[in-house]
Image (cartoon, grey):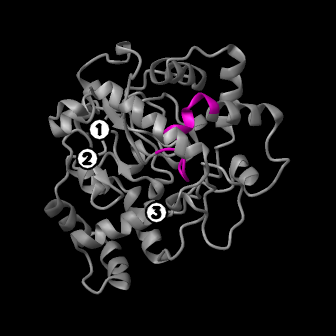
Amino acid sequence: MSRYFHIIIARLLLCCAVSGPTLAQSPAPNTSTRNEPILPLFAVEGLDNRKVSLGEKLFHDPLLSRDQKRSCASCHDIAKGGADKEAFSYGYGNQESLYNSPTILNLEFNYYVFWRGNMHLLDKSMDRALMNPKTMAMDWDTLLERLKKHPSYPDKFKVIYSDAISVDNVRDAVNEYQRSLVSLNAPFDQWLKGDDEALSAQELRGYQSFKTLGCISCHNGKNVGGTLLMQFGVYSNEAIQNERDQGRFLLTGNERDKYTFRVPSLRNVALTAPYFHDGRATTLEGAVEIMAQIQLGRTLSAQETQDIVAFLHTLTGQMPEVNYD
């Protein structure tokens, strides 16, 4: 039942995606873009630069981990596309993480956070990484005490927050920084905004294949993904390798959630190998071929694979600057 349900949903989404943007996908006011199921990225408006600066410092500070050896940026390196280029990251006590570290870039435009869709949007997502015994192994009482004794953090918080250092304020600052991490001006975005010279003939062919084959049914919108939960291995049980692959089932215990994961964003995907929740694909070409086989039931020609990979490279935007001191 679950397998066919996911196939039906994917096909329905494809019909919606190729017919043009829905209301939720509509371009931002006063912008002119092509009528496509993928939308260009724009900088997040209304950010408090003081909070962004403080959040950036916290994000890169190993003080947030119990042994003070790892920071949030250890697994989410901006210079590496917001990930760490490892199949599995290693956290507190050199413990291996359950899943491949997803990119932190453009997280503002995801609906689900984490591979199992544990949370909607950013909200309290920081807590899960902070408190996880395999990552930071921290607790709020210890962290707040450290921050209050720090030579500069108390003054930095007082300037922004009337109640100074608190759990909510730490979350707020880190989330504000994460919201600022948008990879702007990708070649594909330039094309979406009307620049006919931004993409080559091969890249345009790859985008057309991406749509006609059905990849667009799950990878659409501003983030080219990040808004759906889908079964991994619709057409092939070979995709299921171990307990980790049970996905959202490990969170909910519902049989229908077995092998279901958050559809990842394809923004900057050329920078974030290895791929999938378990890092099984070391190259973008390999990832495209696997997805075609197990999600679409298709075997691509070498030319189709090359074209789609060329298109995916056009989703690489400018990396945000790192300015923490």
Instruction: State how far apart marks 3 and 1 are (Cα).
Output: 24 Å
Extent of the magenta region: 212-225
Alpha carbon distance from label 1 to label 2: 6 Å
Residue contact at pointers 3 and 1, CB within 8 angstroms: no
Provide the secondary structure element on which disc 3 rests: helix
Sequence-earlier tag: 2 or 3 = 2
**Percent x, y of residue 206:** 70, 31
Q: Is residue 149 visible?
A: no
The single residue placed furthest to the bottom in the displayed view is 162
Q: Amino acid at mark 2?
A: Met
* Secondary structure under the numbered disc 1 in the rendered image: loop
* Nearer to me, 82 or 245: 245
Contact, mark 1 vs mark 2 (Cβ under 8 Å) = yes
Considering only order in the chain, which callout, 1 or 3, is on the residue closer to the N terminus? 1
Tell whether label 3 touches label 2 (CB within 8 Å).
Answer: no
Three-letter code for the amino acid on which mark 1 is drawn? Gly
- Going 30% across and 77% down the picture, which residue do you hit? 154
**Mark 3 = which residue?**
179
- Choose mark 2 or mark 3, whichever is in front: 3
What percent of the width, then of the height, locates residue 92? Answer: 24, 39
Magenta segment main secondary structure: loop
In the shown orientation, is residue 191 left or right of residue 52? Answer: right
